[in-house]
Structures are given as C-alpha cells and as structure tokens.
Image (spheres, helix red, strand yellow):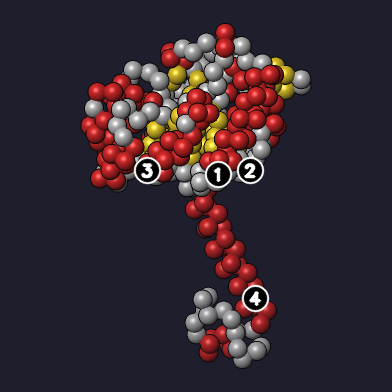
C-alpha cells in the first residue's frame, strides 16, 4: 500500500490504515461511501420543492389599495418576503423599494401592461431596476373584440422578441403569463404552443400559471417537460375539483381554491419544475379571503417534497 494516502477526510489515523488489509479496507471504504450517499439522497428527498414561496401583489390588491406599508407588514408577518408586483398602487418605484428594504423584503418580478412595453419601455426598465426586479412580466395580451388568432400571435411574437431583447440589454428577463384563451386549437397543438415556437428563447420566457393551464384543459407537467428551457416563473394557483377545462372557460373566482385542495397534482408539477429554468414561485389567490387562505396555501406548498 502506498505510503501517501488520500483518505484523510475519511480516516485520520495513518497507523490504523497501515495495519488494515487492503481488500478489507476497500470493502469498508465502499460501504462507508454508500452510507454517505444514501444519507445525502434521503436529505435531498426530504427538502421541499418550494421552501420559500413568494406572492403576487394582485392577491392583496384590495389591501394594497387601502394601505401599502400596512399590507407589506401583513405579508411579511405571514412569512413571505418575495413579491411579484403587477401594480405599484400609486407609489413611486423608488419609494416602494425603500419600503421593501426596510422590511427585508424583495421584488423579484415586475408586471406591466402591453402598451407600457410597446410605448414606454424606458420607464419599465427604470422602474424594474429601482424595484430590484430581474424579471419583467406581461400578464396578458389584449384581444380586440375577444379575438385571439394566428395573426395576433404572430404580431405579438415579433413584438415579444423586440421587447425581450431591449430588456435583456439591460440585464432583465422578459416573460409572458398565460391564461386559458391562448390554448385555442392551432394546427396539431394550440396557439400557446405556436407563440412559444415563434419567440426567441434568448429573449422571451414564460411564466406558467398552473390554474389557467388546467382551466384550459391542459397538463402543466406536460408543458414543463416539453419546454423546460422556456419557463422562468410560476404562479402557484389551484383549480377547483370537478371543473372541466376548456380554453374558453370564463374567469370565476369560485374556481380558485386553496393550494392542495383542487385538481393540480402539485408533487408532479413541482417535480417537473425542478428540471426547468424556473427561478421564482408566487402564490396567487383571487378570492376575497386571502388573509385566511394564503397562509394555508403557503403551508401546503412548503410541505410538498
């Protein structure tokens, strides 16, 4: 056996090493390594998929409309420190950032409207940077007369590519958030699939809303597995059991239920999300009872392993 050994992290006593038979030593070494690997694997399996979920500001829109600093305190007291702001609620971005900093909170995603991105992107960039957000999210596309068709998707994709590049030049990531209407049939898939295919993955990503994917009659797991490199954000939202999905399903807040009590297979969804580029997860609840419901959803999602 060589005089110089490289197993110091495993066994410190060189005199004992020299007394051991080589084959016996190797056998015990392999057993020791196997035990360590097994322990590490068990520890990883015990770790929640989403240990620290954020929240969408829209969830607390009524509270923010009345009292911005008080609502930040309410959210922080729930244990949530990460917010996706889809509205600044009349507060300048630098002032909102000051409020967040004072409470040890962060804004990681900033949601804006389509017209803002088309006509005032410099202000969007400035506000995102002031807030400290690295992601800029478009919540929906306008549909003249309720029409969402191939032509609209093609125009939107071209705009998305241009918008995404402009944001990327400033160190920001652009994502589009889905509803159900994007899943209208197109060719052998949907217009949502068509939008993904038309957009440049260097500049355009997507925020998957699990509720609306299910509401459209599609499986979030399948989307995540089909386009693992295109998703960067996720809205954690559950669809009431018994609701049949269709891309024309109207919005109904009664179908929005506490996470873990609806149709979404959260272990499967979050397991699939581990193989994507998703960086942040935000609880979204559109009901009036968010103060009672959000802590329940947070507790559930943090327990999914």
Residue mark closest to the camera, 3 vs 2: 3
Label number found at residue 26: 4
Which circle's residue, 1 or 3, is located before the other in the chain? 3
Q: Which residue is mark 1?
A: 168
**Left or right of 242 on screen, residue 128:** left
Distance from disc 1 to disc 3, alpha carbons, whole Å, reads: 16 Å
Which circle's residue, 4 or 2, is located before the other in the chain? 4
Which circle's residue, 2 or 1, is located before the other in the chain? 1
Distance from disc 2 to disc 1, alpha carbons, whole Å, reads: 9 Å
Q: Are marks 2 and 1 in contact (CB under 8 Å)?
A: yes
Q: Are marks 4 and 1 in contact (CB under 8 Å)?
A: no
Instruction: Locate residue 31, reporting x and y percent.
Output: 60, 67
Q: Which residue is mark 3?
A: 130
**Left or right of 111 on screen, residue 263:** right
Which circle's residue, 4 or 1, is located before the other in the chain? 4
Label number found at residue 202: 2
User: In which quadrant is the N terminus drawn?
Assistant: bottom right
Distance from disc 4 to disc 2, alpha carbons, whole Å, reads: 49 Å
């Amino acid at each position: 056996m060589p005089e110089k050994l490289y197993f110091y992290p495993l066994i410190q006593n060189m005199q004992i090493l020299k007394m051991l038979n080589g084959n016996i030593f190797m056998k015990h070494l392999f057993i020791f390594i196997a035990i360590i690997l097994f322990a590490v694997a068990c520890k990883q399996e015990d770790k929640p998929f989403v240990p620290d979920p954020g929240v969408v500001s829209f969830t607390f829109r009524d509270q923010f409309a009345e009292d911005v600093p008080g609502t930040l305190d309410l959210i922080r007291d729930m244990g949530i420190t990460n917010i996706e702001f889809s509205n600044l609620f009349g507060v300048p971005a630098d002032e909102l950032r000051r409020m967040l900093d004072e409470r040890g909170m962060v804004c990681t995603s900033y949601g804006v409207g389509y017209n803002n991105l088309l006509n005032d992107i410099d202000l969007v960039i400035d506000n995102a940077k002031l807030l400290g957000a690295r992601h800029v999210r478009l919540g929906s596309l306008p549909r003249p007369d309720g029409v969402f068709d191939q032509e609209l998707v093609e125009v939107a994709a071209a705009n998305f590519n241009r918008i995404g590049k402009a944001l990327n030049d400033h160190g920001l990531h652009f994502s589009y958030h889905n509803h159900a209407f994007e899943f209208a049939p197109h060719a052998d898939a949907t217009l949502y699939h068509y939008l993904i295919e038309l957009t440049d993955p260097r500049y355009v990503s997507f925020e998957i809303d699990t509720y609306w994917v299910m509401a459209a009659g599609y499986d979030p797991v399948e989307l995540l597995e089909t386009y693992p490199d295109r998703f960067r954000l996720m809205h954690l939202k559950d669809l009431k059991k018994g609701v049949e999905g269709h891309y024309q399903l109207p919005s109904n807040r009664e179908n929005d239920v506490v996470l873990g009590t609806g149709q979404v297979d959260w272990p499967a969804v979050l397991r699939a999300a581990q193989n994507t580029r998703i960086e942040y997860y935000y609880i979204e609840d559109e009901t009036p009872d968010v103060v009672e419901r959000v802590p329940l959803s947070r507790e559930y999602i943090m327990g999914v392993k």
